[in-house]
Every structure is written in structure tokens, then in C-alpha cells.
């Protein structure tokens, strides 16, 4: 499939690296020319959902609490559903470890643990 890039198109690079057997996963999004209002709004919603995830990271809360906090922002912002049942995945010794923000899994937050938060 080929497509000619047009003004307003979004180019997404999803990449990472491995250091000392630990994985890093990140992406960057670029708009050609300018981002459309629709793209800007989607970016805002994802950013707010990520903030909600950080706020939900409290000792005693579960990963399901994070999922629900993030998913509510996404749905309220116009997301078209979540057919995979998760937002993000774990990260560490494998590139995509267990989905910690899966709505059916109950992992409790403990002091001293680290997590990654993203949509």
C-alpha cells in the first residue's frame, strides 16, 4: 500500500532500545505542515488520560483503577472504544510485558515499585 503524504497527515514512529537487558519503548508523532484540529484534540485527550493515570498511581490502588481512570478520559473525549481491553503494556525484560493497565487484572501499587504510564 502506498500513499502520498499530505498536509495535516500524522507520521508515527514507534521505537525503542535495549540497555543492559532492559527495554525502552517510545513513540514520536509528527504532523506534516500542520496538525488538524481533530488531531490536536486527540493529542489533548491522550495527554489528559495519561495525567489521569499518573493521578491514579497511589499506594493501595490497583492497575485496574489506572485503567478506569484513563479509559474514562478517553471515552469522554470521544474514543471509539477499547477492543483490546488495555491501555499500554508493561515494560522491562521483554518489550511488551504483561498489560498492567488491563481492566481485568488487579495488581496493587506498593511503595518503591515503578510503572510506565502511557496511552
Image: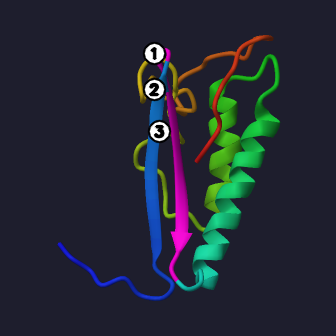
Reply above or below: 44 against 111: below
- The CA distance from mark 3 to mark 2 is 7 Å
Question: Residue 74: which disc?
Answer: none
Spot occupied by residue 15 in the image (x, y as percentages of width and height): 44, 45
On screen, residue 47 versus residue 90, left or right, reads right
Residue located 49% across and 57% down the image:
81
Residue 21 got which mark? 1
Residue tagged by mark 3? 16
Marks 3,2: beta carbons within 8 A = yes
* SS of the residue under disc 3: strand
Callout 1–callout 2 Cβ contact below 8 Å: yes
Measure how far apart labels 1 and 2 are at the Cα level: 6 Å
Residue 18: image tag: 2
Q: Nearer the viewer, residue 40 or 5?
A: 5
**Helix, strand or loop at disc 2?**
strand
The image quarter containing residue 65 is: top right
Q: Which residues are magenta?
A: 20-32
Q: Residue at x 47, y 51 (%)?
A: 82
* Mark 3 closeness class: few <14, some 14–19, many ≥20 residues within 10 Å: few
56 vs 97, nearest the viewer: 97
Amino acid at each position: 500500500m502506498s500513499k502520498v503524504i499530505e498536509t495535516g497527515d500524522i507520521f508515527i514512529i514507534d521505537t525503542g532500545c535495549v540497555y543492559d537487558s532492559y527495554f525502552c519503548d517510545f513513540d514520536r508523532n509528527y504532523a506534516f505542515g500542520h496538525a488538524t484540529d481533530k488531531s490536536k484534540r486527540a493529542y489533548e485527550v491522550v495527554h489528559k488520560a495519561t495525567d489521569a493515570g499518573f493521578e491514579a498511581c497511589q499506594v493501595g490502588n490497583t492497575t485496574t483503577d489506572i485503567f478506569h481512570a484513563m479509559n474514562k478520559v478517553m471515552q469522554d473525549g470521544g474514543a471509539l472504544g477499547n477492543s483490546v481491553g488495555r491501555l499500554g503494556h508493561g515494560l522491562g525484560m521483554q518489550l511488551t510485558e504483561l498489560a498492567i493497565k488491563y481492566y481485568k487484572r488487579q495488581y496493587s501499587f506498593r511503595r518503591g515499585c515503578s510503572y510506565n504510564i502511557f496511552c
